[in-house]
Image (tube, rainbow, N blue to C red):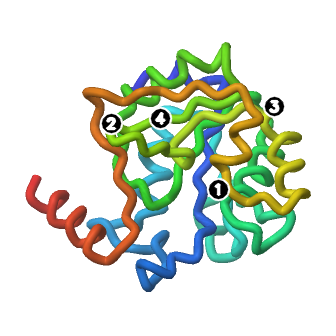
């Protein structure tokens, strides 16, 4: 049994509402052995988090997972809208957010990030190359009014909205890099890696 006491006061949020134009098919249902990408993520997160919410605008397709699925309050406004809507639906102050196309993650990194929550409204990892990962991050509900104001001003970029929040940018060093499956070749490479183990 995995010890998930660290995350008892957190909700895990899966952002699963992207259009996936670059992949050419719905990323959520890409097969990974005997499950799809979304099912795999749910299974892994359930080991650590007592609550899971999915952000998606087609809840009828995801009913079989028996998890809350939250639609964007205003559709067509991108990831910041999805993030804000699902944070509003969460019942916990702290929330760990992960995009559905991040198939593997280091739980030790997540634990290290969480330690900075008491002093910040968001904890965002920064890769060695300086790239920020706002879709693999912790967010407090305190971000909601700031994000909503940004959206009302037609600002849709998460990184710009974050400039108004107290954010801790976690510098990644020895941790496993965070990889998204954006293109077909990313997916094929990931599957080859899984099959070789």
Query: Label 4, on which residue?
Result: 125
**Which marked residue is nearer to the observer: mark 2 or mark 3?**
2
- Where's residue 66, x and y in %? 64, 58
Left/right of residue 62 with respect to residue 196 in the rendered view: right
* Separation (CA) of disc 2 from disc 1: 29 Å
Residue at 77 percent across and 35 percent down: it is 164
Q: Residue furthest left?
A: 196
Q: Are marks 1 and 4 in contact (CB under 8 Å)?
A: no
Q: Which mark is residue 142?
A: 3
* Separation (CA) of disc 1 from disc 4: 21 Å
Name the quadrant of the N terminus: top left
* Separation (CA) of disc 4 from disc 3: 19 Å
Q: Earlier in the sequence, mark 4 or mark 3?
A: 4
Query: Label 1, on which residue?
Result: 54
Left/right of residue 126 with respect to residue 164 in the rendered view: left
- Where's residue 27, x and y in %? 46, 72
Query: Label 2, on which residue?
Result: 128
| 23 shown above or below 156 | below
* Separation (CA) of disc 1 from disc 3: 20 Å
Which one is in front, 179 or 70? Answer: 179
Left/right of residue 19 with respect to residue 197 in the rendered view: right
- Where's residue 47, x and y in %? 45, 36
Q: Earlier in the sequence, mark 1 or mark 3?
A: 1
* Separation (CA) of disc 4 from disc 2: 10 Å
Residue at 9 percent across and 58 percent down: it is 196
Q: Residue furthest bottom?
A: 24
- Where's residue 72, x and y in %? 79, 64
Q: Earlier in the sequence, mark 2 or mark 3?
A: 2
Q: Is label 3 in a helix, a strand or a loop?
A: helix
**Which marked residue is nearer to the observer: mark 4 or mark 3?**
4
Which one is in front, 172 or 4? Answer: 172
């Amino acid at each position: 049994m995995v010890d998930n006491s660290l995350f008892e006061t957190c909700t895990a949020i899966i952002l699963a509402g992207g259009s996936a134009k670059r992949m050419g098919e719905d990323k959520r249902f890409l097969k990974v052995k005997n499950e799809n990408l979304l099912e795999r993520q749910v299974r892994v997160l359930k080991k650590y988090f007592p609550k899971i919410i999915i952000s998606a605008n087609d809840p009828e397709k995801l009913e079989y997972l028996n998890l809350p699925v939250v639609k964007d309050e205003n559709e067509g406004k991108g990831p910041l809208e999805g993030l804000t809507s699902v944070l509003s639906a969460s019942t916990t102050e702290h929330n760990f957010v992960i995009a559905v196309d991040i198939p593997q993650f280091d739980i030790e990194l997540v634990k290290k990030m969480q330690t900075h929550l008491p002093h910040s409204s968001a904890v965002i990892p920064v890769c060695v190359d300086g790239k920020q990962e706002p879709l693999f991050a912790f967010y407090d509900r305190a971000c909601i009014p700031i994000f909503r104001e940004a959206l009302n001003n037609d600002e849709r970029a998460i990184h710009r909205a974050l400039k108004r929040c107290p954010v801790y940018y976690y510098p990644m060093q020895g941790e496993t890099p965070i990889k998204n499956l954006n293109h077909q070749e990313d997916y094929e490479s990931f599957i080859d890696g899984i099959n070789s183990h």
